[in-house]
Image (cartoon, grey):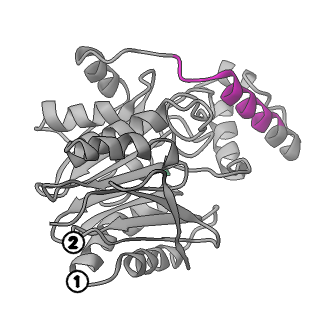
Amino acid sequence: MAEPVIIGSERSEVGLPVGVEVLRRGGSALDAVEAAMRRCEDNPDDHYVGTGGLPNARGEVELDASVMTGSDRRFGAVAAMRGYPNPISVARAVMERLPQHCLLVGPGAELFAAENGFARAELLTDDARRIWRGQLTEAGQRAGDSVEGENTAAVAGDRRYREAALDLVRRLAPHEGPWGTINIMALDTSGELCVGVSTSGYPFKYPGRVGDSAIPGAGNWSDLRGGGAACTGRGELSMRGGTARTIVDLLARGSEPADACRLALADTAALPDEFRAELRALALTPDGRHGGAAGQEGSVYAVMTLDSTEPELHPRVAL
Ligand code: GLY
């Protein structure tokens, strides 16, 4: 049996020590992933997950998350969910308490969270609101139009709003600094391999937009016959590429994790796409090998084993 290990994408370092502690105590990969991801979601300085996540074009934080276990390919997910700070836990609850379904969205996900005792919270922090307002103002100035901060929300639903929101989505890029969804995957002493993904989605997205993080086969896949894989970056590409599933299929056919990630990203890189097209992938095998790839140089992922005192950063291969 392979040694337990937990790995994660950029900025998962905040949560991995919590997850590896679960594994040290003999806990499950699912418990480790959930615990580690919750810590990331609760970090208000991270503007791409949970509390503090950057909002949609109307200034509302909408969260997507999913969890999948490789022994049975059980999958649970929520998407476009507002007002609940730990979507990874709601996704797990969908998987365990509502097994006739895999994915709940919007008001249905919020109803399920309320009925299952999750506490509501304000997710839009002052810092995230300031970044959003700044982006709206800058975008409006760049376009020479009159879109200004919350005035956009004031006319939500009408034709002008929809046109402005679409235009913003076309023009806005993530702000500088490490950005993106968080992937965390763990292997436990029983050999279970769990993959978790959580995100506030593409910043300033069109309201209701769901990315790959909640979509099985796109942003998340786990199957002990090959391994686990997950993506960060522009989820529309991994949805079009079936990227996480493609990586696991390549692992099952004998590819090494970094090669499988690189090949799957190369497939999406060939897609016609006029928008920012950055995508990253991460993979872990049932015998504990791991690797990652990215569309740009300098991207890393973090690893902890039972002996680790802190997360160790490993380079991803660049396309
Ligand atoms: N990869 C996260 C998203 O596109 O929302």
Q: Answer whether labels 1 and 2 touch (C-beta < 8 Å).
A: yes
Residue shown at 38% from the left, 29% from the top: 106
Label 1 element class:
loop
* Left or right: where 163 falls relative to 306: right
Per the image, the residue denoted by label 2 is 226
**Looking at the rendering, which quadrant does residue 153 occupy?**
top right
The kind of residue tagged 2 is Gly
Q: Which mark is residue 269?
A: none
Image coordinates of residue 183 in percent, x first then y, are 42, 52
Q: Dividing the image into 4 quarters, which one contains the N terminus?
A: bottom left
Per the model, the C-alpha gap separating discs 1 and 2 is: 8 Å
* Left or right: where 105 falls relative to 164: left
Q: Main secondary structure of the magenta part?
A: helix
Is 131 magenta? The answer is yes
Q: Counting residues from the N terminus, which is met first, the one under dot 1 or under dot 2?
A: 2
Residue shown at 36% from the left, 75% from the top: 257
Q: Residue 171: in sight, yes or no?
A: yes
Image coordinates of residue 240 in percent, x first then y, are 41, 65
Residue shown at 59% from the left, 29% from the top: 44
The kind of residue tagged 1 is Arg
The boundaries of the magenta stretch are 122-137
Q: Nearer the viewer, residue 194 or 18?
A: 18
Per the image, the residue denoted by label 1 is 253
Q: Is mark 1 within 8 Å of ligand 1?
A: no
Q: Is 87 drawn above or below residue 202 in the view shown?
A: above
Q: Residues within 10 Å of mark 1 (few under 14, many from 20)?
A: few
Q: Residue 78: in sight, yes or no?
A: no
Q: Nearer the viewer, residue 29 or 139?
A: 29
Residue shown at 12% from the left, 38% from the top: 99
* Left or right: where 246 falls relative to 14: left
Number of numbered markers: 2
